[in-house]
Amino acid sequence: MVKLHLWVFIVLIYLLEFGLSDVIEVPPLNINQKDLMKHLSLIDIKIALPAIYVFGDSFVDNGKNKAILGNKDAIGGGYLPFGIDFDGKPTGRVTNGRIGVDFIATVAGLPYPPPIMGMSKIDRKRIQTGVNYASGSSGLLPQNGHFLHKNVINFFQQVDLFENTTMEDLKGSKFVLGDIYKVFQDVFEMPESYGFKDVNTSCCIDNNGTKIQVYAPNIALCKDRKTRVFFDPFHPSETMHFLWARRFLKDSSVCSPINLIQLMQA
């Protein structure tokens, strides 16, 4: 019995000392590279990438649909409350603030990669620091997302746009695999250790506060969105975006065979 109590005591000490060590504190908007590196405890690490190119769906889309549809975009974060924590401006990101790619770009010393559809042909040829080709609702199959709206750019079209943007030969490329499913799984198993209080419900609710809303403009928001995993029913909050970006940057257990910091230095 004494031994059992001893083990319980040791476990409690471990949880007190280490269980909250990963509590997420999202850095302020417009933080610079140096301060973000310090925030991430990445001291004395020099990063200088030439460019970042982004492919994907609404998890990494930063405004392709908004560039086409403006504030009429009901799927891609074209109106409030999306962007409420991005200076209160809807940017086309389907979340309340920044997405993971934004944090990664800042660590790399680069501006946020602009959405391809918001650029002129001249700008596309001049851009030197990267482009975001991601398109909300897209997927590997050409028909993915078209039941929602007709402006989806599927993965193969994104790659075609990339080939038309850069003519450089990508010899010696290195690839890593980021397991975002594992990041979510870890949060669902121990949400408190990351500072999350709600892993199930959306932060977007109707005016009566009784029903989760999907893509409804100017709806009420939960007051604790910093401690929610999801901002709307399908998309992560800025806090969750920062978490997956931070882990991809530093943690080789979810980004392998090397993490993104190691890749940037390779």
Image (tube, rainbow, N blue to C red):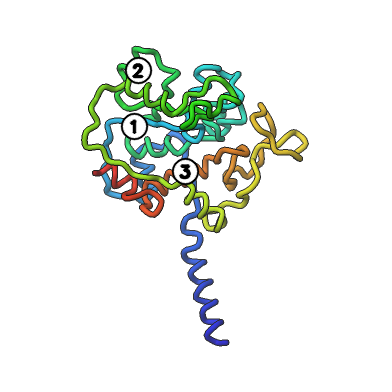
Q: Which residue is mark 1?
A: 52
Please name the residue shown 50% across and 19% down the image: 67
Check contact, mark 1 vs mark 3: CB within 8 A: no
Please name the residue shown 67% across and 28% down the image: 216
Q: Residues within 10 Å of mark 2 (few under 14, many from 20)?
A: many
Q: Residues within 10 Å of mark 1 (few under 14, many from 20)?
A: some
User: Relative to the observer, which residue lies in front, 148 or 218?
Assistant: 148
- Is 181 placed above or below 234 here? below
Q: Which residue is mark 2?
A: 124
- Foreground mark, 1 or 3, reads 1
Please name the residue shown 24% across and 31% down the image: 170
Residue 199: image x %, image y %? 60, 49
Task: From the viewer's perspective, tell me whether residue 136 is left or right of residue 224.
Answer: left
Q: Which residue is mark 3?
A: 242
Q: CA distance from mark 3 to mark 2?
A: 28 Å
Q: Amino acid at mark 3?
A: Phe
Check contact, mark 2 vs mark 1: CB within 8 A: no
Task: From the viewer's perspective, tell me whether residue 101 is left or right of residue 221.
Answer: left
Residue 217: image x %, image y %? 66, 26
Q: CA distance from mark 2 to mark 1?
A: 14 Å
Q: Residues within 10 Å of mark 3 (few under 14, many from 20)?
A: many
Check contact, mark 3 vs mark 2: CB within 8 A: no
